[in-house]
Image (cartoon, grey):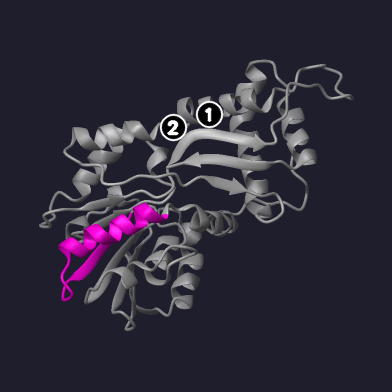
Amino acid sequence: GHLPSDYALSDVSYLKAKNVVDAQSIHSPTWNQVAANLHVVLAPNDILRVADVGAGVLSMLSLLLKGQHDKKALLQMIKVKGVEYFAYEPNKSLLEACRENLKRLGFQLQTESEHELIYHRSNQNVTVHLRMMDFTNDDRCDEVQPNLIVGCCFADLMDPHELVESLLRFTAATHNDMTLVYFPITFAGITQFLPPQPFGTRANDATRRTIPSDTTAFHMYSKALSTRHGHNLDPDKLVAAMSDYGGTLLHRGPSNWKIDPTDNEYLWKTMLYFFGTVGASEMMKQGYDSVGWVDRAWEQRPSIAVTNI
């Protein structure tokens, strides 16, 4: 109960706010490298086939079609006859926002079935297969045949070997010589408040428990993410897992988040909510005042810095 009454967690609002920061943070040279590699394997009369394995509200589709910030649209950088875009999102509460975004991007609904919604726009000949499911549960994945697999803010959420194995199963039937895998924004394990605060106590706290320093608190937050939630906080482990299965690292670079309490207010509040809910039990277990820690951040309004690759 650390957050003010005007805050409510909404998956859609969170993703929309996060996508603004993602768009600034995505590493441009790596994005350009994706285009360069696709340019080599696709001829102008080919169809680009994409599988977005963590589609959210379709921010990566938007980047591909329109570009963002210093990133050019992928379709400006490569010449193809069209795109087949398979978007996987198991969170059904995002469906309406996906529909709205597709409409905004100029798509029209073609068919709707139990399995997928198919949208098309004649401009650039793009078809979107919206599948509200986990990509690992798709019994029709053989038809996807992706040239490119995309997963934004996705690859750190599970064990690296499990992730690579599930991607291999997903592409088992593919006839393509090469499938590119692109993971923009993969958490690299470090979260900070700027400026950071030291250990302290709350003046009115009868228990006299210590408020942890920000460094200590985020150490406990990371521990909870990896031990309780199964997240991988070391991108090098993913690189190693990929190479264990025959993958080659083509490019990487920093995609760090800087979340401003004013400019990115909703995302900032949501991150504080996550820090409190995920980190609190670990802090309390070690005898720290977790409520005091979140309240202090609330009052001081530090920026939040997150390392991503």
Tell me the tag on residue 129.
Answer: none
Q: Is residue 175 left or right of residue 185?
A: left
Query: Residue at coordinates 78% horizontally, 22% vertically from top-left?
Result: 200
Where's residue 99, x and y in %? Answer: 46, 71
Where's residue 10, x and y in %? Answer: 60, 54
Asked if the residues shown at circle 2 and circle 1 are in contact, with their CB atoms under 8 angstroms apart, the answer is yes
Instruction: Provide the residue span drawn in magenta.
Output: 28-52
Which residue position is annotated with label 1?
A: 222
Query: Residue at coordinates 15% horizontally, 70% vertically from top-left?
Result: 43
Q: Quadrant of residue 194?
A: top right
Q: Is residue 40 above or below residue 262?
A: below
Whether residue 1 is visible: no
Q: Is residue 228 above or below residue 89?
A: above
Query: Residue at coordinates 75% horizontally, 38% vertically from top-left?
Result: 2
Where's residue 22, x and y in %? Answer: 50, 54
Number of other residues with Cα within 10 Å of mark 1, as a class: few under 14, some 14 to 19, many 20 or more: many
Amino acid type at circle 2 is Leu
Q: Is residue 131 magenta?
A: no
Which residue position is annotated with label 2?
A: 233
